[in-house]
Image: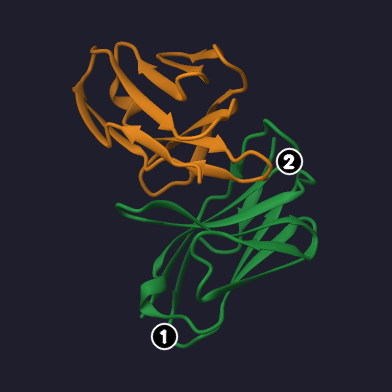
Amino acid sequence: ELKVEQNPLFLSMQEGKNYTIYCNYSTTSDRLYWYRQDPGKSLESLFVLLSNGAVKQEGRLMASLDTKARLSTLHITAAVHDLSATYFCAVDVKGAQKLVFGQGTRLTINP
Amino acid sequence: DVKVTQSSRYLVKRTGEKVFLECVQDMDHENMFWYRQDPGLGLRLIYFSYDVKMKEKGDIPEGYSVSREKKERFSLILESASTNQTSMYLCASRQGGAGYEQYFGPGTRLTVT
């Protein structure tokens, strides 16, 4: 059974700092997705990573995928308050049409 | 742009009532999903459907049923609502095949009193 674990689950940081959220998964997959959720809102797609070594960047966020290590990272550069949200990673279940989600990382960026 | 809509943003029902949550997507996606989200428990898959009239149980199907009579519409049914079904319900859709992201609706916050 595929398990997806995020780390840390809670992260409080100051504006201007850099940090990384980690997403580990337990079985082979080469497709991983990152989502953002603002309080009281639904999930919004951030990145789709479809192969080993894939790297995507949008503004201050950069996501990468290492399928051999079964690890994806979401790196935040020079954080700003607007990035405060909960971030989820999700992995494709091979042979099925569904995703397995991590627990989510609640990120709070303080001025 | 893909659009997934849900019939209500907020819903209050009484214990024992039958509750219908509707989800509609406009991108001809094969796959549709119902999740519930509770604090500290993340997203949990209730049911999903990969084609009209086809359904599969997710991780927590007990107390729920679903219906998919048309490709664009996926309904979640609570046969007899209970207070432990108070939650945020999220619908999602996804194109069939590999490597496609899921698109989520705005969510329905259901309170059962």
- The answer to whether residue B1 is left or right of residue A6 is right
Instruction: Classify 10 Å Cα crowding around label 1: few (below 14), some (14-19), many (20 and above).
Output: some
- The answer to whether residue A74 is left or right of residue B45 is left
Name which of mark 1 and mark 2 comes first in the sequence: 1
Residue A27 placed where, x, y %? Answer: 51, 34
Residue B11 in sight? yes
Q: Nearer the viewer, residue B63 or A43?
A: B63
Residue A86 in sight? no
Could you tell me the amino acid type at mark 2? Gln
Q: Secondary structure at mark 2?
A: loop
Question: Which residue sits at x=55%, y=30%?
Answer: A28
**In this view, B28 is above or below B112:** above
Badge 1: chain ID: B
Q: Which of the labelled discs sits on residue A44, or is there none?
A: none
- Residue found farthest to the bottom: B16
Q: Quadrant of the N terminus of chain B?
A: top right
Could you tell me the amino acid type at mark 1? Thr
Chain coloured orange: A
Question: Which residue sits at x=57%, y=50%?
Answer: B105
Instruction: Classify 10 Å Cα crowding around label 2: few (below 14), some (14-19), many (20 and above).
Output: some
Determine the image quadrant of residue B19: bottom right
Residue B103 placed where, x, y %? Answer: 61, 42
Question: Which residue sits at x=61%, y=40%?
Answer: B102
Q: Which of the labelled discs sits on residue B15, or is there none?
A: 1
Chain coloured green: B
Q: Which of the labelled discs sits on residue B95, or is there none?
A: 2
Residue A102 placed where, x, y %? Answer: 42, 40
- The answer to whether residue A80 is left or right of residue B69 is left
Label 1 close to label 2 by CB (< 8 Å): no
